[in-house]
Amino acid sequence: MQIEKVYEPQRFEPHWARWWIDSGVFHASQEASRRVFSLVIPPPNVTGSLHIGHMLEHAEIDVTVRWHRMRGDNTLWLPGADHAGIATQMVVERQLAEEGLDRRGMGRDAFIERVWAWKAQYGDRIRSQMVRLGASCDWSRERFTLDPGLSRAVREVFVRLYEKGLIYRGEYMVNWCPRCHTALSDLEVKNSETQGHLWHIRYPVATPGSYIVVATTRPETMLGDTAVAVNAKDPRYFHLHGHTADLPLMNRQIPIVLDDLADPQFGTGAVKVTPAHDPNDFEAGKRHNLPRIKVIDESGRMTAEAGVYAGLDRFEARRRVVEDLERLGLLEKIEPYALAVGKCDRCKTVVEPLISTQWFVRTKPLAEKAIAVVETGRIKFIPENWTKTYFEWMYNIRDWCISRQLWWGHRIPAWHCQECGEIVVARETPSTCARCGSSQLVQDPDVLDTWFSSGLWPFSTLGWPDETPDLKLFYPTSLLITGFDILFFWVARMIMLGCEFMGEIPFRQVYIHGLVRDAERQKMSKTRGNTIDPLVVTETYGTDAVRMALLLGAAPGTDIVLSEDRMESTRAFANKIWNAARLLFVNMERSGVQPWLPNRLETFRPEAQPSIEVAMEDRWIFSRLNTCAEHVNRAIEQYRYHEAAQLLWHFFWHEFCDWYLELKKPAFTENSGLNADWRNVLAAFETALRLLHPAMPFLTEELWQRLKGAAPRPLSIALAEYPQYRRQNADHAAEREIGVLQEIVTLARTLRTEMKIDTRLPLQGTLHARGDALEIGQRHAAAIRRLAGVALEFSAEPAPAGAATRSTSQIDLVLHVPKTEIEAQRRRLTKEREQLEKNIASLGQQLSDEASLSRKPAHVVESMRAKKAAYEAQLAKTKAALDGLDG
Ligand SMILES: [Zn+2]
Ligand SMILES: [Zn+2]
């Protein structure tokens, strides 16, 4: 049996990644007889490239999905990508800009064609990265949010909501990017703390020479003020109730209104109200029926309404307005002021709040159902605290603005009649106006918010609105695993739309994972330069090692720390398993054992097979495997990935490799053939590989495939049965027996270390033991001699007081160290004592020299004192060890 000396995952990972797909291992079946487990991927942006957050998300999904598949469920992980409206449009626009082109110049159709061409060329990146990393998706069911099928679902939903009165047009304050010429969602606006100013401006009031002072961070918007608000309870302004103020520079009278917008605790307690350029003022304007005067246009320039400032850029206008106020003596003061400035996530232009006509979804009626299904526990959030966040959002939900001024996306299926102004909303492009019969219809230029189509993802991907077999079988899906940042944008909308259109929840559980942070627990970001590129680290450490490193930190409700150190150690773990396999394969060859797929643990029952001799260590490892299976199954079921990873690590490293294989080594004799020992070793190994498979799919497939039995078996370990706890496999007698053996060996090794005795030096010893520990020790005398290098005598009497004894509750172990070794020890310890005494004396002298001490910095003196104390402690130990030798 050939097996390479070194664990080199790069040699076999790409092969299995491809083979799994080509062999249909991940293909979900349409047969209805099996239990179903289904999950849709949070569709990554088509513009994206895999980052470490994706890798964590996909590792968690993949562990759960592989586990279900191995448990025999008809398992579907449905993959796909999101067309990502603005993100994709920006990428292509940037590309055009480099060619000196611009989308407006080329026209809508040509531009969209260009985006599709871009997608054909670059849009596959995430997909191929996921394939390489072994994500066990059913790629035959891959979807894209702009697929014809999904686009049909989008239209259907839009039309039905419109017909139900749940979609309407209305005025809305949007975050507008004057550079991209589009409304931005909150997600697309990045707020950054900026050092700005607070300008205090005097608005003259009726009494001559008297003012009301308002403070603003954006003086240019005052040109569009239509009121000043004060708080009704603020005594400073009782005399102004019902009066007006004179808006400087514009010479307009504006009312002084009473509104809670004005906080008596903040500044002067009076605020300017600009309904056309501030979202809070927009709402206040509605409350008081104030006119909206738009002084800044879609390009960020001042409009004709801005009087003499018309045509100026908004920042230039700010400068001029401030100058003019100053000149008129209306500027009371300017204070430095830190404020959050919203910028377009794509182009970094400062966002301008603007009023525009947009399409809305009336969300209240949809939210009611979506709240109910969580309240009644039909959908569960894990960790549970996200439920509260969800309710907070849902109870305060506002109507959803779904139109975007973009070209790339689902165009709104509404047509405006150029003759009579009628709006026709239809599934198919209408040829005439429903009201006047005119054929002059122009489709609405806007597209839908990206989240509109991804909100339908759990059912649109399965064929809705058609009643497909997939839809019947896989909806509702079982689980969603995603990040908290899209809980509202995506998860809540899927729940609302699923309940509305399917009459059924989209998923039963939502597991919210954490963020991946660096070794210093810092958030990873490109600007910090601490990002970890999943493709680079998988190339360095292997996919399995990176997965394992992520999983080890993936405790529910916490962030995940990922460092090079951690990946080094998980790679060492993979290497450990590789070496264990190598040990087995090399010895199989010597023993003349053919690569063989052994009996399953499931059917292994020692007491039922009296003809097969079962060594105690075999009984023990099967019992340990059984316990490990019990705990790992439970951990995966409860999304405690960190715990599953730790259990597997402990089992493989500390039980299978450190103890079992060490105990088993003498059984690997030349030309032994496939005896009971080999059967049991291979059964244990094969079972352990299956247990580990969901966490480390590549390594386990590679090794499992090398156990090429002739017997019929699943094509892939990914389709083999996941080990389950079986009561009959619990073997308490074997656990007790090997437990005592481990105790004796560990005690002997500890003694050796403490006494600094060469690990290879064979020793004599006596085991004084109580109860069955004595017999167990006697039965395993040979193994103890081999593992601890101690030949034991046995005694039922307690150990005599004296040297080199270590005890536990049931045993005392005495090591008989040879005279020559004791003498060597004595010489070494004496030398050590002398050196320590010398050091202490020297430090003592320095520390008593007051004159020289006074010239030294305090911390140096402090460290000298600490050093002396450490030497003294060491000296005490050395002396005790010397005394021990004499005992
Ligand atoms: Zn922009
Ligand atoms: Zn018409």
Image: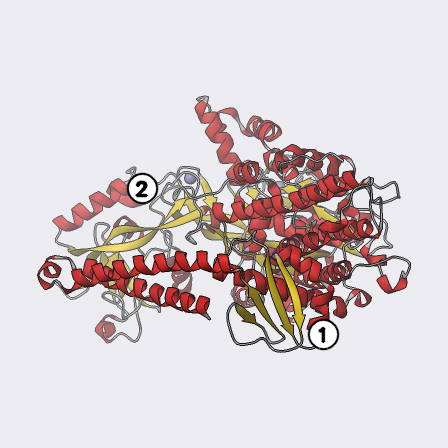
Scheme of image coloration: secondary structure
Answer yes or no: disc 1 within 8 Å of ligand 1: no
Which SS class for mark 1?
loop
Question: Measuring 36% from the left and 60% from the top, which residue is drawn there?
Answer: 830
Label 1 Cα neighbours within 10 Å, binned few <14 / some 14-19 / many ≥20: few
Is 261 situated left or right of 64 in this image?
A: left
Precedes in sequence: disc 1 or disc 2: 2
- SS assignment at label 2: loop
User: Looking at the image, which residue is at 36% across and 48% down?
Assistant: 294
Ligand 1 quarter of the rendering: top left
Residue, disc 2:
302
Identity, as a three-letter code, of the amino acid under mark 1: Asp
Q: Residue at x 48, y 26 (%)?
A: 96
Nearest to the observer: residue 546 or residue 685: 685
For the residues bearing labels 1 and 2, Cβ distance under 8 angstroms: no
Residue 661 location in percent, x, y? 69, 52
- Identify the mark at residue 772; answer none if there is no mark: 1
Labels 1, 2: front one: 1
Looking at the image, the residue that sits furthest to the right is: 611
Describe residue 549's horizontal placement relative to residue 710 as left or right: left
Residue 709, numbered label: none
Q: Measured along the vertical axis of the image, is residue 188 above or below residue 254?
A: above
From this viewpoint, is residue 138 visible?
no
Percent across and percent down for residue 285 are 39, 60
Q: Position of residue 487 (x, y in %)?
A: 56, 57
Judge left or right: residue 227 versus residue 680: left
- Classify 714 as above or below 368: above
- Quadrant placement of the N terminus: top right
Q: Residue furthest top?
A: 99
Name the amino acid, label 2: Met
